[in-house]
Image (cartoon, grey):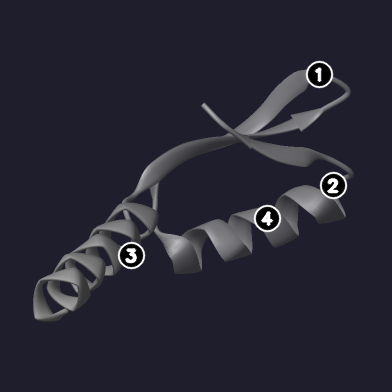
């Protein structure tokens, strides 16, 4: 039972670590890229999402 809990804990930490990786995103309006966010972390991506939606665009990963 202890081994199962240990493996589960390691799996959860791995998922959290991968989710917090910096990624590249782009803001598209009518299929045209109007801005990019390279190496965005979670805080920066949140601000990028907001500014992109205000301009009528959508954010997608590169």
Q: Nearer the viewer, mark 2 or mark 4?
A: 4
Residue 49 numbered tag: 4
Q: Which residue is mark 2?
A: 55
Can you give x and y, in whole percent of width and height, for residue 8 in the image?
A: 25, 68
Disc nearer the start of the sequence (3/4):
3
Disc nearer the start of the sequence (1/4):
1
Residue 31 numbered tag: 1
Q: Nearer the viewer, mark 3 or mark 2?
A: 3
Q: CA distance from mark 2 to mark 4?
A: 10 Å
Residue at x 39% of width, y 58% of height = 41
Q: Is residue 40 above or below residue 13?
A: above
Bin the neighbour count of mark 1 within 10 Å (Cα to Cα): few under 14, some 14-19, many 20 and up.
few
Disc nearer the start of the sequence (2/1):
1
Q: Of helix, strand and loop, which one carries label 2?
A: loop
* Quarter of the figure with residue 58: top right
Q: Nearer the viewer, mark 3 or mark 4?
A: 3
């Amino acid at each position: 039972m202890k081994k199962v809990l240990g493996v589960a804990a390691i799996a959860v930490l791995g998922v959290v670590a991968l989710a917090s990786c910096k990624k590249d995103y782009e803001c598209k309006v009518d299929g045209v890229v109007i801005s990019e966010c390279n190496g965005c972390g979670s805080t920066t991506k949140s601000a990028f999402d907001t500014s992109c939606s205000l301009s009528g665009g959508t954010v997608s990963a590169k």
